[in-house]
Image (cartoon, coloured by chain):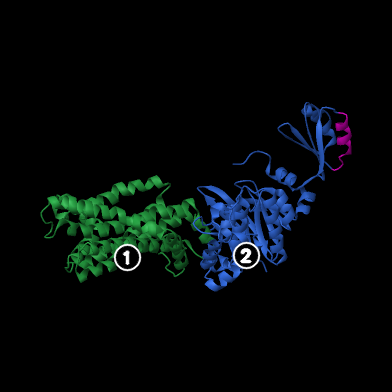
Amino acid sequence: MAVLAARNLRKSYGGAEVVAGVSFAIAPGECFGLLGPNGAGKTTTLRLCLGLTDPDHGSIELMQRPVPGEARPARARVGVVPQMDNLDPDFTVGENLLVYGRYFGLSEGAIRARIPQLLDFAGLSARAASQIQTLSGGMKRRLTLARALINDPDLIFMDEPTTGLDPQARHLIWERLKQLLAGGKTIVLTTHFMEEAERLCARLAIMDRGRIITEGSPRELILRHIEPHVVEAHGDGVMDWSDREAGKLASRLEKSGETVFCYAADPAPLLSSLANQGELRYLHRPANLEDVFLKLTGRELRD
Amino acid sequence: MHIFSPPSMSLRFVPVWRRNLLVWRKLAVPSILGNLADPLIYVLGLGYGLGSMLPEVGGVPYIAFLAAGMVCSSTMNSATFEAMYSAFSRMHVQHTWDAIMNAPVDLDDVVLAELAWAASKSVLSGVAILAVVWLLGLSGSVLSLWVIALLPLIGLTFGALALAVTAMARSYDFFMYYFTLLVTPMNLLCGVFFPVEQLPAAFQAVAAFLPLTHAVAIARPLLLGQIPPDAVLHALVLLAYAAAGFYAATVLFRRRLLK
């Protein structure tokens, strides 16, 4: 029984189809990642799932309720960590949680009993009385996460939860998300950090131009879409080398600026060729999700 | 939900209203003093300064005449400011509404809460001016207590109209149009500072359509110890503006935020 199921969602703005036929189903306890470049339609898809905007076509079931028809009661079982910080700047850390709990119709006593646990989870126990302006970016994110848990939700939506955070703060958020998954929560995560998706998500969908272009576990996606080895080469004369040698030795080449990415099932011939090119610098690594992402969505900039 | 369907009215607005109350409580004293200072200076400055040069206006000293105008006008201003600048900050700058709508609260609930809050805050302003009016001995009638019942209606009327403007605003600058085109003309044409009858007929006709005229028409007789003629009619005009403004605001906010 899916906690969230979307079938053939479509949504247009001013003639441009932002979501162009998206379907997915999310099982309880799963961490599902929605990846895609900016403007791929991820945030609109989340808004549709929450019933914040009506789809032009398609159907959504959230917590076994039809959305948007019963979006409000469905949202009572859901937590949301939005992309943009929207904590209440007029309140302290504790007040933010208290006031947010009231929106769920929770009793004052129930909220107050829950706040210490949530502050502990967010590592903010000592900051209950702090003003929001005094918190670091990482603390604000953790508080936003704690706020999303005030109603003890079964499903948590996270829209780019670690954007703008330093590595320490990011790792702490990842740790907490793993804890939530271990506790049986379901998570829907949008991100464009491939490392984040690879670490957290059991299943991913890559979205581009309003469509899901591939779906599977991180491992499956890498096996399905890309050669297992990557050799990145750069330096003076790299383009000559690439035209002369790499084209024959790699199964696929991508050029980006002054770097040549060589994809190959067997990297040995590439590496021995490079060993003779003194002026070239190179890196050999296993293919990762980012390679898949860039192959499928292209290297050109998205705005 | 269709964009034009009537606003859904539910008690879910209460926690959102309480949120605004909690913010206000942190700044209550400066807020009340700030809301009081401006109208008080008008009452005292114009009332005593200008009033000393004037014969009686409408059969009473000018300052007693002005009192009812200032009670209505400052209630209007307070509701207008709250529903424009403060609501816009919460919606557009702080994204507070977005956070609320991720909880099981709908946009309609948030709009209703903003209206109720703007009205509540304006009632506090109105009562504060009223208290000063009583303290200065400008109104001694028991009937003036009825003005307290009028204040929420004034607050709802101007809060609703201002929310409709907020729903269309792209920045704070947009609010200047509403002040220039409506708030200032209302303050000058609707009987706040002088009787509407002093105006040329054309202006009187315009004033008859403006909601503040109808608020003053109820408040002034009450403060002067008279039962206002046509009070029900005036109240119905205010109610109609409140309902139309609230409906327009709800539709415009839906168009803006639920797209």
In the rendered image, residue A269 lying in the magenta stretch gets the answer: yes
Say if residue A102 shows up in the picture. yes
Give the side of residue A1 with respect to residue A150, left or right: right
**The chain coloured blue carries which letter?**
A
Give the side of residue A269 with respect to residue B160, left or right: right
Measuring from the top left, give residue B234's x and y in whole percent: 23, 64
Residue drawn where x is 65% and y is 56% of the image: A189
Chain at numbered mark 2: A
Amino acid type assigned to the residue bearing label 1 in the image: Pro
Please state which of residues A11 and B41 is positioned toward the viewer in this rendering: B41
Say if residue A5 shows up in the picture. no
**The chain coloured green carries which letter?**
B
Residue drawn where x is 82% and y is 33% of the image: A246
Measuring from the top left, give residue A155's x and y in whole percent: 64, 64
Q: Quadrant of residue A239?
A: top right
Chain at numbered mark 1: B
Question: To which residue does mark 1 refer?
Answer: B152
For marks 2 and 1, give the one nearer the viewer.
Answer: 2
For mark 1, does the 10 Å Cα neighbourhood hold few (<14), some (14 to 19), or many (20 or more) residues?
A: many
Amino acid type assigned to the residue bearing label 2 in the image: Leu
Measuring from the top left, give residue A114's x and y in whole percent: 60, 69
Question: To which residue does mark 2 refer?
Answer: A118
